[in-house]
Structure formats: structure tokens, C-alpha cells
Amino acid sequence: MLQRRSALAALAALPFAARADDKPIRLLVGFPAGGGTDAIARLLGEALQASLGTPVIVENKPGAGGQIAAQALKAAAPDGTTFFVSHDHTISILPLVLKNPGFDPAHDFVPVAGFATFANALALSGGTPAASLPEYLAWVKKQGGQGSVGVPAPASVPEFLVKLLGEKNGLNLLAVPYRGSAPMIADMLGNQISAGVGSVPDLITNHQQKKLRIVAVMGQQRQGVLPEVPTFAELGVAGFEDLPYYGLFAPAGTAPAVVERFSNALAGVINQPVVKARLTELGLSVAMMSSAQLATRERAYSAAWAKIIKAGGFQPQ
């Protein structure tokens, strides 16, 4: 009995590896402040800080579709003080479209836990005279068949969608890459660009405020926060049914006990009614994935997109 109590006490006192008690936990974000990923990270950071009793700081390292933040995670000490809040683009897509991304998720990162899936969507700017995807495509045709559509990062799922929409409808749709969703949405709000493809968490607030209009979403079914918006599949655009994910990652070499503790803390946080409700409002489908489940999900997603990218003739840059 005494030995069991000692073991439990040792487990409860287990630090995040060799982390100093006064050193905060960093949550790296690969996109600018003000975007959907940033809002999600700050919500989780605040809740995790309360749960763990340790300061949690969100650190934005925007640029290159999350590549800069990913490289920062790779370089970080595996001491339980640095984690990466990321979605599919950085982890699964960048290694497929870049010859040298500067990181290899399979060797440089440890999946900690997944916490949600989400859908990408096509939204129209306020000054675009269309209320649906068919109307938008017809409008572009009247403009000489040429149109520009913003995407939050080059060589991304949104860019591949824009290319497919153009090819399928005989239009010259140009994907205009931005350094994240925030500057793309700013240009959409200023009517500098007629449309944009981004995640529902990035677009939902402006859609609800009627500043932008989401007209189609990816996935096999309509989104709960957007029941009136059809899927691309409903509109005859197949191939975008597999939903991307959000997860937390740690540097390679992070101790399994640290990963487990942080994963357990995250599971508790996302099941808090207030946190879960807010994540849902942001357009996420909240669902916990263990470290092993996230690793499996990432491999399957990468394999599926590798086929799509190859079939589309895209050459890694």
C-alpha cells in the first residue's frame, strides 16, 4: 500500500520532463494573430493554463503556411515547454508540395492529441454580386472567364480547390496566396478580391455578420453552424469530402509521460461546456484523438492527398 501511494505521488509530481517550474509553456501558431487558428490556440491556452496551473503563452510565428512555426518546433528542446497547434496544411500538405520544408513530421514531431475536425469553405466578398456558387461561376464567366480567389497559403488544399473549380467550369481562376487567413479576409472585406477559400473557423464570424457570404463547404455533410450552405459534393464538385484536422504536436524526443499528461489535460479542457461550445461556434467538430489516433489520421490524410496532388500534375517546389 505504501509503495502504491509513493508511486502515485511520484506520478502526480511528474514535471513536463526537465521543465523549470517558472518557465511557461509555449503554444506555437503558424499564422497571424486574428485568424481562426490563433483564436483556437488562445482559447485552449487559457483553459490549459487553468487546468495545469502553469502559464501558457501563445506565440505566433506566421509565414510560409506554418512552415516557420514547424521549424521552430523542430528546433525546440523536448522538455515539455513547447507545443504546436496546427491543422492539416502544415503537417500533412507542406511535406508533399515542398522539396525541402525543413522538417519531417514523422521524425521531427510527436503527435500529442487531436481535438477537432473542420471544413474549408468558399466565401464571396460583400461587393461580389452573387449569392451562390453557381451564380459566382456565372458572374466570373461574364467577366471574361477570369477571376481571382484568395487562399491562405500557396500549394494548399484551398489552392487545389480553386484550380479544380476553374478547370471544371472552363474558367481561368487564379489562386492568390496570402500569409494566412487574416490578411486574405481583410482584402475580402475591402473588396480587393472577389472571393476566398479558407476554413470555416476563419470565415464564420464575418459570414454571420453578413460581411462575407459562405456559399459552399467541404465535407460529406453540411456543417452544423452553416445548415443552409451546401457541400461542394452537392454542387457537383467531388474530391473534397475528407475533412482536415486540428492537433497538438511536440518536438521529437518528448517523454511519453509528458505527452500523456498534456493529452489528458487537453481532453479535459475540450470537454468543458464553455470551451466546447466556443469551439463549436468557431466551426469545429470537437472530437478527441489520442496520440496514436492522431498519428494514424495524419498518415491517412497525407496518403489521400499525395494521390490527389500527383493526379493533378503538381510538382513540388
Image: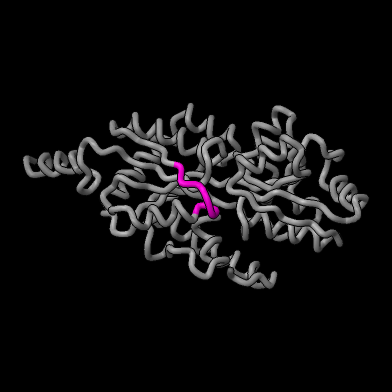
Q: Quadrant of the N terminus?
A: top left
Residue under the image location 76 percent in, 38 percent down: 191
Residue under the image location 31 percent in, 48 percent down: 260
Where's residue 214, x and y in %? 74, 40
Front in this rendered view, residue 172 or 242: 172
Residue under the image location 38 percent in, 58 percent down: 109
Query: Does residue 295 sit above or below 29 in this rendering?
Result: below
Q: Quadrant of residue 268?
A: top left
Q: Quadrant of residue 26?
A: top left
Where's residue 19, x and y in %? 22, 44
Where's residue 33, x and y in %? 52, 37
Q: Is residue 105 covered in magenta?
A: no
Drawn side of residue 209 relative to residue 68, left or right: right
Drawn side of residue 104 relative to residue 190, left or right: left
User: In the current view of this chain or complex, which residue is farthest to the left?
Assistant: 2
Q: Which residues are magenta?
A: 60-66
Where's residue 215, x and y in %? 77, 42
Q: How is the image coloured?
A: one colour
Can residue 217 be seen here? The reply is no
Drawn side of residue 60 relative to residue 283, left or right: left
Q: How many marks?
A: 0
Can residue 95 be seen here? The reply is yes
Query: Does residue 205 sit above or below 187 in this rendering?
Result: above
Front in this rendered view, residue 45 or 316: 316
Drawn side of residue 131 relative to residue 68, left or right: right
Front in this rendered view, residue 26 or 279: 26
Q: Quadrant of residue 263?
A: top left
Q: Quadrant of the C terminus?
A: bottom right
